[in-house]
Image (cartoon, rainbow, N blue to C red):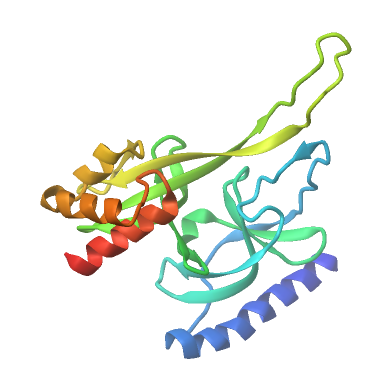
Amino acid sequence: MKKITFLAFFLSFFYSFGQYDVNVFNSEVTPNTSGMWIVDEKQDNEIEGSYRLFKNDFHTGVITTKDGKKFKVPGLNYNLKADQLEVKISKDSVYAFDTASIVEVDFEGDKFKTLFDPKKYRPTLFEVIGAFNNQSVLKHRSVKVKPGIVNPMTQQKQTPDIFVQEFTYYVTTVQGGLKEIKLKKRTILKLFNESADVIQEFVSDNDLSYKEDDDLKKIFKYYNQNS
């Protein structure tokens, strides 16, 4: 009965926001995604940090499905450990989306696209850092537990274990694949070909970094506005 109640709420929830998005996106919204109900995993109190994109808070996001339809979803987060989008329905239950059924999700300006992960051999979400000449620079996030320091004499922990996010950057290839890159000046400038000198001057004049996401987004925005 509890799951039936959740399901009824979930469907009515999408219907109400679907009506809202018909006006915003001027298209009929009928969510076309698959997923499953799961019990919300309790955070291990002995491990600091979070395995979710937004710590343990849930934010509003706009999901684009494979058929091009968009719908607004409050209570959305990205579980980096399970590598899936989740909607919090109640205190103990969440709905986990099938990543393969989603094309894109926009967290208030931060866009993530579903692409095939060459390391995991399955679809996963990549944050879009910037676009140029029909290609993109992408950021993949994962999470691991960094063990705390243990006193060798007492075998007691001096510092707690902590969830740590790890990042890998890629550039899309002309053939549609992904090539791993390091965020270095030479690597980034090479992406702009004959415009490299102009970009280098822009970075210098505005005291930007080739290694910071926010600065890279400014660089790509400038390039696209002036190319």
User: Residue at horizontal 24%, vertical 65%?
Assistant: 224
User: Residue at horizontal 77%, vertical 37%?
Assistant: 47
| 96 to the left or right of 179 | right
Q: Is residue 127 visible?
A: no
Q: Is residue 5 visible?
A: yes
Residue 159 image point, x, y percent: 78, 28
Q: Residue furthest top?
A: 153
Q: Nearer the viewer, residue 72 or 95?
A: 72
Q: Is 174 located above or below residue 8 in the figure?
A: above
Q: Quadrant of the C terminus?
A: bottom left
Toward which corner of the image does residue 26 lie, by quadrant?
A: bottom left
Q: Nearer the viewer, residue 14 or 171?
A: 171
Residue 86 image point, x, y percent: 64, 59
Toward which corner of the image does residue 8 lie, by quadrant?
A: bottom right
User: Residue at horizontal 19%, vertical 67%?
Assistant: 226
Q: Residue furthest left?
A: 194
Residue 80 image point, x, y percent: 59, 46
Q: Quadrant of the N terminus?
A: bottom right
| 176 to the left or right of 167 | left
Q: Is 217 located above or below residue 19 in the figure?
A: above
User: Residue at horizontal 35%, vertical 60%?
Assistant: 218
Residue 162 image point, x, y percent: 71, 35
| 21 to the left or right of 54 | left
Q: Is 63 located above or below residue 205 in the figure?
A: below
Counting every numbered tag in the picture gives 0
